[in-house]
Image (cartoon, rainbow, N blue to C red):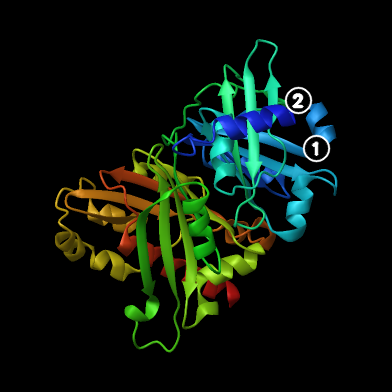
């Protein structure tokens, strides 16, 4: 194991800074920090049918002061860590936040080129780039940068014939280099959504530092559809993406009036600052997935009956006449549908962890399950339905 020398870092930063994009190939993993590691292990294995593929070895546990496991499904990797000492990164995170995402990882083709690109655009590395060579000659390189999302870091990882998850992690079960099958067909991450009280610095960072481009935007307020209310809340959301890899990030901010009634403001307050609100997993059959997850006692956010009552008329206006799924089944399972011009998508959102476990330290994060039938958007009607369902759940929780 070693860090790159200043000479190597300079060489990569000067010679390879002319890359025309950040060089992301796709999502690599995300790092979730929790207080109860066994509860998380049970959730991923017993609920989502993930498989444990790696865990931190004794030397890394002793050095880091935290336990870490890696859960896998297809290409999805979730690292879950819990602190053993108060000096660990996990403990420092949990002193400021409830359980949540501490870092997001991305695969890159050439880490040196990626670093050169980021530094030429003002990216801030959190430490010198790291490199490790396995006994079989495989190469692992990584670097982390600061983000406008509070304590969430972005990690860029290059692997060349390196089969382990990362230095200090030992394979268990099928191992990291496998593509573990998942009974729900979970194999990829569709997108990541973050919340902040002000969105522009986050979106500008995606654009100016990462080189991402605008993909989708929405603005609305609940008063739009409930004029009789003397309160309400709204949001503005912008999706930025990296066209070469398809990696997408949605960012939400609250809208006035009633700024502090917004579920976006509530998330930031509960989370102790901006952060990752949810991550979406793609599946080939959302109905079957939801039905089985319900049998496993996974709870989902509720959607008002009016949404499904209006669905046939709304689909006609959107030019969608080819939905294969029965609308009555979608209504029964509370699955949302949106799209346009004979392309559509189906999605549903789990309850946030805090309410699922009745434990505020479990945090306001949740997962989305999505099935795409040609539509690559985010669904205006669905977005509003999600927003209002979260607000209803938060209102009940507040009593």
Q: Residue at x 63, y 51 (%)?
A: 152
* Residue 7 drawn at (x, y percent): 71, 28
The residue labelled by disc 1 is 64
Q: How many marks?
A: 2
Q: Is residue 369 visible?
A: yes
Above or below, comparing residue 390 to residue 87 in the picture: below
Q: Quadrant of residue 58?
A: top right
Image coordinates for residue 316, horizontal then vertical, percent: 14, 60
Residue 103 quadrant = top right
Residue at x 41% of width, y 48% of height = 241
Dot 2 crowding, Cα within 10 Å, few <14, some 14–19, many 20+: few
Q: Quadrant of the N terminus?
A: top right
Q: Which residue is mark 2?
A: 2
The x and y percentages for residue 76 are: 51, 35
Residue farthest to the top? 136
Q: Nearer the viewer, residue 134 or 383?
A: 134
């Amino acid at each position: 194991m070693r860090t790159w020398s200043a000479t190597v870092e300079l060489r990569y930063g000067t010679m390879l800074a002319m890359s025309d994009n950040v060089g992301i190939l796709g999502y690599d993993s995300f790092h979730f920090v929790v207080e109860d590691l066994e509860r998380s292990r049970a959730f991923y294995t017993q609920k989502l049918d993930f498989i444990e593929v790696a865990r931190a070895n004794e030397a890394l546990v002793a050095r880091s002061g935290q336990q870490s496991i890696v859960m896998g499904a297809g290409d999805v990797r979730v690292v879950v860590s819990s602190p053993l000492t108060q000096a660990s990164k996990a403990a420092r995170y949990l002193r400021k936040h409830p359980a949540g995402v501490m870092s997001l990882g991305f695969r890159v083709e050439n880490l040196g080129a990626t670093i050169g690109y980021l530094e030429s655009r003002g990216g801030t590395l959190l430490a010198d780039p790291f490199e490790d060579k396995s006994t079989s000659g495989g190469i692992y390189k990584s670097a982390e940068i600061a983000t406008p999302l509070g304590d969430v870091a972005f990690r860029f990882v290059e692997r060349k014939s390196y089969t382990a998850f990362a230095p200090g992690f030992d394979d268990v079960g099928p191992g990291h280099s496998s593509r573990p099958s998942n009974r729900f067909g979970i194999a990829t991450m569709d997108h990541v959504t973050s919340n902040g009280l002000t969105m522009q610095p986050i979106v500008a960072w995606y654009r100016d530092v990462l080189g991402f481009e605008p993909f989708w935007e929405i603005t609305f307020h609940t008063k739009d559809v409930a004029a009789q209310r003397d309160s309400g809340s709204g949001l503005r959301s912008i999706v930025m993406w990296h066209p070469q890899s398809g990696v997408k990030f949605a960012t939400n901010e609250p809208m006035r009036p009633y700024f502090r009634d917004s579920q976006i403001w509530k998330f930031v307050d509960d989370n102790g600052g901006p952060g990752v609100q949810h991550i979406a997993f793609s599946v080939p059959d959302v109905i079957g997935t939801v039905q089985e997850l319900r049998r496993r006692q996974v709870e989902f956010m509720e959607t008002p009956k009016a949404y499904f009552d209006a669905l046939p008329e709304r689909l006609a206006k959107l030019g969608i006449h080819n939905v294969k799924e029965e609308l009555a089944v979608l209504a029964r399972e509370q699955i949302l549908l949106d799209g346009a011009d004979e392309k559509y998508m189906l999605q549903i959102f789990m309850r946030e962890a805090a309410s699922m476990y009745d434990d505020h330290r479990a945090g306001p994060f949740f997962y989305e399950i999505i099935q795409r039938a040609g539509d690559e958007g985010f669904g205006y009607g669905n977005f509003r339905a999600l927003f209002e369902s979260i607000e209803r759940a938060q209102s009940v929780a507040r009593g």
